[in-house]
């Protein structure tokens, strides 16, 4: 688009239509101009990010007014999908700090839902351990994939995110001012792969506990490959979570029919292998598991994957709070 179109008024929405058959203008016919389409797409993209920024601002304003737990903006980037790092509770002084890494479809525009998850876990953790403070961080510090296929089928997004997450988790430990911190990293969906790659790359990462929920695999075959004691690596996948049908490597090699295979057949063919390694919620992975509700069935309530988003409720939320606070048995 020409520069003056951006600096001045909106570009013309319509332009004349030239017939591909005659090569002549068709009188009275118009089509949306290329300039308009580019303008409209960019406007919507920017508006989405502005909406997300407003969600964060509203949340921080409520904290300042004393209506919600204290909130801190730790990072922000005006990238295509937008990035934000927000803590519920002060991570520099809290006894327990959990860093939540969201997955596919996460954007600044949708940050409100992820912030609610962070706040729900912070509240539940302080109920589980009222004598100690917990800070719950939303780490949307990367560009998450925006489709299941083809984007989430590539680990390139996680490869780009692992170093920033590595640095952030190191910073959480370094910035802590009030004795040792009990640090947990919580990955959901594709975010489990981001967390797994960050941990595997740096075995010295100052992380005490790991939680994976709704995982398509974490980039390693065994919990011991994460640099954290296997008994501190926890995972769960709801029975009705569609991620159970994530394609195995053999299925992908055969033409991406994995999502159509029954989970039992995948297990027979691949020994608990899913897209990015051994399923962390199986015994073969070597970590520990915790209880979660089965969740809603696929398509229930008009949602494609309702169970994939239900880990911040009921039994699952309580169990994650116990892990974050060191109360898990």
Image: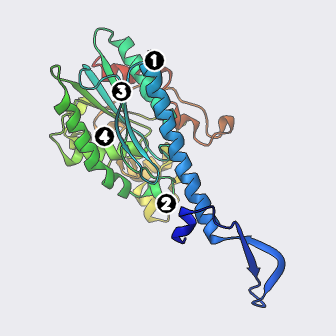
Label 3: few (<14), some (14–19) or many (≥20) C-alpha neighbours in 10 Å: many
Label 2: few (<14), some (14–19) or many (≥20) C-alpha neighbours in 10 Å: few
Does residue 1 sit above or below 276 in this rendering? below
Disc 2 vs disc 4: Cβ atoms closer than 8 Å? no
Location of mark 1 (residue): 65
SS at mark 3? Answer: strand
Location of mark 4 (residue): 285
Report whether 302 appears left or right of 75. right
Q: In the displayed orientation, state which residue is furthest to the top.
A: 131
Mark 2 vs mark 1: which is more N-terminal? Answer: 1
Q: Position of residue 320 (x, y in %)?
A: 38, 24
Q: Nearer the viewer, mark 3 or mark 4?
A: 3
Disc 3 vs disc 4: Cβ atoms closer than 8 Å? no
Does residue 233 sit above or below 261 in this rendering? above
Label 4: few (<14), some (14–19) or many (≥20) C-alpha neighbours in 10 Å: many
Q: Quadrant of the C terminus?
A: top left
Q: Nearer the viewer, mark 4 or mark 1?
A: 1
Residue 150 is labelled as 2
Label 1: few (<14), some (14–19) or many (≥20) C-alpha neighbours in 10 Å: few
Location of mark 3 (residue): 136
Q: Nearer the viewer, residue 18 or 182?
A: 18
Does residue 9 sit above or below 236 in this rendering? below
Mark 3 vs mark 2: which is more N-terminal? Answer: 3
Task: Find the distance from the CA under tag 2 to the CA under tag 4.
Answer: 26 Å
Disc 3 vs disc 2: Cβ atoms closer than 8 Å? no
Residue drawn at (41%, 23%) of the image: 121
Mark 3 vs mark 4: which is more N-terminal? Answer: 3
Q: Nearer the viewer, residue 183 or 119?
A: 119
Mark 3 vs mark 1: which is more N-terminal? Answer: 1
Residue 84 is labelled as none
SS at mark 1? Answer: loop
């Amino acid at each position: 688009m020409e520069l003056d179109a951006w600096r001045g008024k909106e570009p013309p929405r319509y332009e004349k239509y030239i017939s591909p058959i005659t090569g002549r203008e068709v009188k009275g016919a118009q089509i949306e101009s290329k300039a308009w389409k580019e303008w409209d797409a960019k406007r919507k993209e920017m508006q989405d990010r502005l909406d997300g920024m407003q969600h964060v601002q509203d949340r921080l304003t409520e904290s300042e007014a004393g209506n919600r737990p204290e909130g801190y903006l730790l990072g922000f980037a005006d990238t295509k999908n937008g990035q934000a790092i927000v803590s519920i509770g002060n991570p520099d002084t809290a006894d327990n700090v959990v860093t939540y890494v969201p997955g596919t479809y996460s954007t600044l525009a949708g940050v409100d839902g992820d912030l609610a998850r962070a706040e729900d876990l912070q509240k539940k953790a302080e109920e589980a351990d009222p004598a100690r403070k917990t800070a719950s961080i939303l780490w949307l510090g990367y560009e998450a994939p925006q489709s299941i296929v083809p984007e989430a089928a590539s680990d390139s997004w996680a490869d780009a995110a692992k170093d920033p997450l590595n640095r952030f988790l190191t910073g959480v430990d370094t910035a802590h001012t009030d004795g040792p911190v009990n640090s947990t990293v919580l990955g959901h969906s594709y975010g489990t792969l981001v967390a797994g790659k960050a941990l595997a790359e740096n075995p010295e990462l100052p992380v005490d506990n790991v939680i994976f929920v709704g995982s398509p695999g974490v980039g390693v075959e065994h919990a011991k490959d994460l640099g954290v004691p296997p008994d501190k690596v926890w995972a769960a996948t709801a029975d009705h979570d569609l991620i159970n049908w994530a394609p195995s490597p053999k299925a992908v090699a055969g033409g991406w029919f994995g999502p159509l295979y029954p989970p039992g057949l995948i297990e027979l063919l691949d020994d608990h292998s899913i897209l990015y390694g051994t399923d962390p919620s199986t015994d073969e992975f070597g970590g520990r598991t915790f209880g979660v509700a089965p969740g809603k069935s696929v398509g229930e309530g008009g949602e494609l994957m309702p169970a994939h988003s239900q880990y911040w409720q009921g039994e699952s939320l309580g169990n994650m709070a116990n892990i974050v606070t060191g109360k898990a048995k």
